[in-house]
Image (cartoon, rainbow, N blue to C red):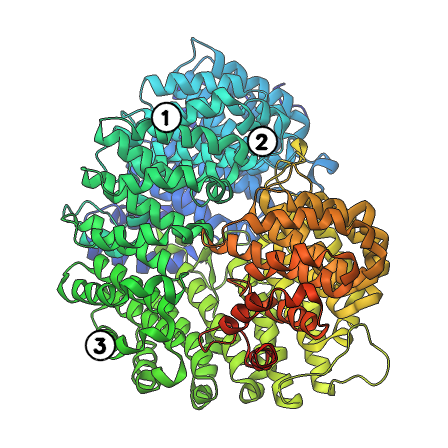
Amino acid sequence: FTFLPLTEKIKPILIGSNQTALILVMSISAEATQVASLLLNLTQPDTEAIRNAELLLKPILKNPNSIPALFEVLSARGTQPVAVRHVAALLLRKRIPGHYKNLPADYKVKLQADLLLLLAGETERMVRNGAIGVTSVICELQTPSRDNAAASGQVPWPELFQFISAATQDANPDARELAFLLLMEMTETVGAFLSMQFNQIAQLFHGSITNEQEQVKVKTAAVKALGGLMSFLADEPEVDIFCNLLPALLQYSLECQKRNDEDTVSVILDVFYDIALSTSAVVSNHTAAIVRFCLGCMSDQNFEMNIRDNASLVVATLSESKPKKFGKDTELLKLTLDTIFNLIENSDETGAGALFMSNPAWRDDDDDGAFDPEGDNATETSMAQGTLDMLACELPKKYIFKPVVEMCFSRFQSPNDNHRKAGIACLGVIAEGCAEPFREHLTEIMPIVLQAAGDSSAAVRECACFTLGQMSEHCQPEILGYSNQVLPIAFALLDDQSVAVQATSCYVLEMFCERLSPESVRPLLDSLVRKLAEMLANSNKRSVQEMTIAALAATAVAAEEEFAPYVEGVATLMGKLMSITDEKMFSLRGRALECMGHISIAVGKENFRPYFTQTMQCACEGLAFDSNDLHEFAYALFANMAKTMEDEFIPCLNELVPHLLEVLKQDDGLLERQAEVKGELGAFDDSDDEAEEGNYVINVRTALLEAKKGAITAIGEIGTHCGAAFFPFLDETIKLLQKAATNWHPLIKAEAAEAFPSMVTSIVAAQHGGSIEWTKGVITGPCPFSDNTATVTSVILKELVELLKDDDQETVGKACGGIEKTLDLCGPFALAMVANDCLAATHALLTKSAPCQVLGDQDDYDDDDEHETFMVAVCDLVAAFGRVMGPHFVSYLPQFVPPICEFAKSSRPISDRSMAVGCLAELAHELGDGVKDYWRPVLLPAILAGLADEDHSIRRNAAYCAGACCEGLGDHIVGDYVQILQAVGQLFNIDPSTSDTAAAVVDNAAACVSRMIMASLSNVPIQQVLPVLLKALPLKNDFTENETVYKCVLGLLQLNNADVLAQKEEIKRVFIAASAAESEVDDEIKQQLQLGLQALN
């Protein structure tokens, strides 16, 4: 079979010719007449007539003989109305799949031949389009198995493709359009069976699209058919044949834009979206041209907003699939950013829309009533900000961060309010995607943002609050160093005349406060709580009320037990809201539940006990409402209640856990017939005796997904904190979590990974009193597990190891954390159950060869690729191997150390370098002299480079690593003490009061020196070192090192060394401060320090 030559059976097409018309105009049978009369009733504006016709048609359509009758009606040109013939075509398309196998073979042949004659002669466009649909269905039913379609060389219904070939060469433009419409309708069939003819088909498309004399309707049909094939073949190598037509397609796209042909532009944008993720080199080579066209569409105010938004989605998707190519093209990136900024600054819309438009309450409070719950509601600003957010998240930071920040700073200097609004808003938009460079440049960015918070324009102030909130959320912990500046500003803006500014200031407080210490929030605590309570009581806007509640909850989290005096008043306010029964206000009810959950965590069991029963009652009552959102809030509350109340939560388990397990059993995606989803003539889709294979789609229940995630979270916390009481539910829960771990949605898989360890915690509580004694590296002798514990632990670890191979990075990170928790609880006997597979999967992650790492822009690898957050969990798991395996892990170091060191290179991002040095430090701490072979080639260079780094987190980890090596390697490295002390000594010049991270560096430097002294006192110049060490005490941040530093100082005192005694007064100062009641030092160490004080006196 070849595509172009004609057969004798198919003559050139003359649509509407008299000859063809004579063939098709005939009297119809009695059966067809009856069907036609019923179809006529379906077209009438009479509900009762339509209902009666449907009832009479349904039994008729169950009979295979309905197919010839319907085709007679379809073919009855001149004797039946166009509308009736069109309905006949629609019903034929629906019913043929169920009846085709029962039709006689000779009738099938006749049907196909007559259908081609009908197509050739039909002049009514509506009927012809219906017949095209019937043709595509019959062609699909004629197809052999697609698995070996190309290999078999079989082509379904060859006469049809000869017909199409003839039509493409016909002088009549209607015939040429018909050919391309048929190809479009049969995209999957063409893509599966005509691969040998792809080059010829591509020539047809090219000839039509580039022919200046061709009619627009023919070109449009060709473009739609071409687009369908490109989309269908997007992941196949054959797509390149059609992607070579991209220049012609782009040129035609511009023509369509000029004449404002939105329908065709929409089709083309859909094609660009479908091929954006393709690995085709041809697509990659045309990335810039596609982006430029899309940017033009985004800026074209003649287009409807949905078209412009679709164009922005293509740009965002190309940034995801071709991040380095996009980022390296500085001209293209500049054009993209210019377009984005222009859209924002030329609009009067809020620049904080990224925050508000995602909030249903804010949309409901919108006075202009412009929000359409059924529409996409895109605006120029939301479109631009969404695109910028995607660029910031996907493009390498070295390409995107600097140009955006420079444009933001430049705009902020403008006298134009909208320019300043755009500048400050875009800073907030990129805060998440560019969090790492943001943290590095806070000293330059914060003054601008703080200045914007006092701007004369309310729009600018609103955006400043939005940006402060984004920075508070994504620039931790560095942003906390600005608490003295941020909190007063946010507090003052609660009284702003603009409601939007008030709301965004609540957002700032929420994001900022939940990570603060009690000391930081204490100065404003009373006035802040009173102000927020006043706003909550007086506001009539649900959005402001919700944000106020969130800010109150965050304030409680920051204040911890100091919030106790306010619990009664806040609980009274929340009690009213938790009882709301108005469905439109359920989000407010949910926020109140959420707030009470956070308060319980903040103030603890004793302070929250009086409010526990009422809060639980309100949450459980909410489960009776048909609201997945309300259920989700309730499940989050249950998780927090279990965490807070622990054993006092146990009485709730018998009723609550079965409900949660039922949630896990629900389907979060419904399989529905495709025709039902489309809805056209849906009354005729229901058939008990017909199989419609392949005509199904998944309808995702997003709200249920979130609720199911919340239920899994609650189950995990209950299993962890209710321990043995959860044991009766263990078997069923594990089975459901196993099912959740294979869920199609990563949200559910990740949550299951996080909940798995709690199953082990529960059985260990039930059968081992809550803990298992194990020794590092020891797997000889009797196993400490009961049979049940061994079974559960094995099942859970195997599930988690399997999730290490998942293609979702968040899931993999949660699985790493789950394995680490399980190993810390159960020790080396647990690891032995899965050791080989677990070590291999972890090594694959370190070498970036795991399934979750091999997707994307692989052909453009850079040594300084972006930091992947989940890799922190991977390195933590490697450290856990050392902690559990001990000396047994030394033999694995040759495989694990090199890839860890790759992350420590100076070209890597700060987070990578900090992570790698921290991992090396943990291994040195756990393996002792097992790392001696790596001291000179790996550890010493990493330590010296880290100590000299400008980043505090890297310095901190390097100091810890140096101390761990000195402690573990002893005399083996004393020759390097001088250069280590010189490098560590520089850290004591850091002012610990500037930030928590600065204090942590000094604390770790003190711990490093302490370890060096204890490891080899004779190699430390104590006279010079001790005064510096004592000046840094007591520790300010990293209190885990208290034992190390005070053990060192107490040990020195016992030596009665003259140099030590010379520092007697300074030692007394340190001991007095460290042993004070408010000190963060453990009581046992305090007692030792007090004895030391007595000796000094």
Q: Amino acid at mark 2?
A: Lys
At which x and y percent is residue 869?
Answer: 57, 51
The tag earlier along the polypeptide, 2 or 1, is 2
Q: What residue is at 86 percent from the left and 53 percent from the top?
A: 933
Label disc, if present, on residue 569 of the rendered structure: 3
Looking at the image, is 487 positioned above or below residue 786?
Answer: above
Label disc, if present, on residue 339 of the rendered structure: 1
Q: State the separation of the CA atoms marked 2 and 1.
A: 20 Å
Image quarter of residue 16: top left
The tag earlier along the polypeptide, 3 or 1, is 1
User: Alpha-carbon neighbours of circle 3 within 10 Å: few (<14), some, or many (≥20)?
Assistant: few
The tag earlier along the polypeptide, 2 or 3, is 2
Q: Amino acid at mark 3?
A: Gly
Q: Secondary structure at mark 1?
A: helix
User: Alpha-carbon neighbours of circle 1 within 10 Å: few (<14), some, or many (≥20)?
Assistant: some
Q: What residue is at 22 percent from the left and 26 percent from the top?
A: 415
Q: Amino acid at mark 1?
A: Thr
Looking at the image, is 1075 positioned above or below residue 123?
Answer: below
Total of numbered circles in the picture?
3
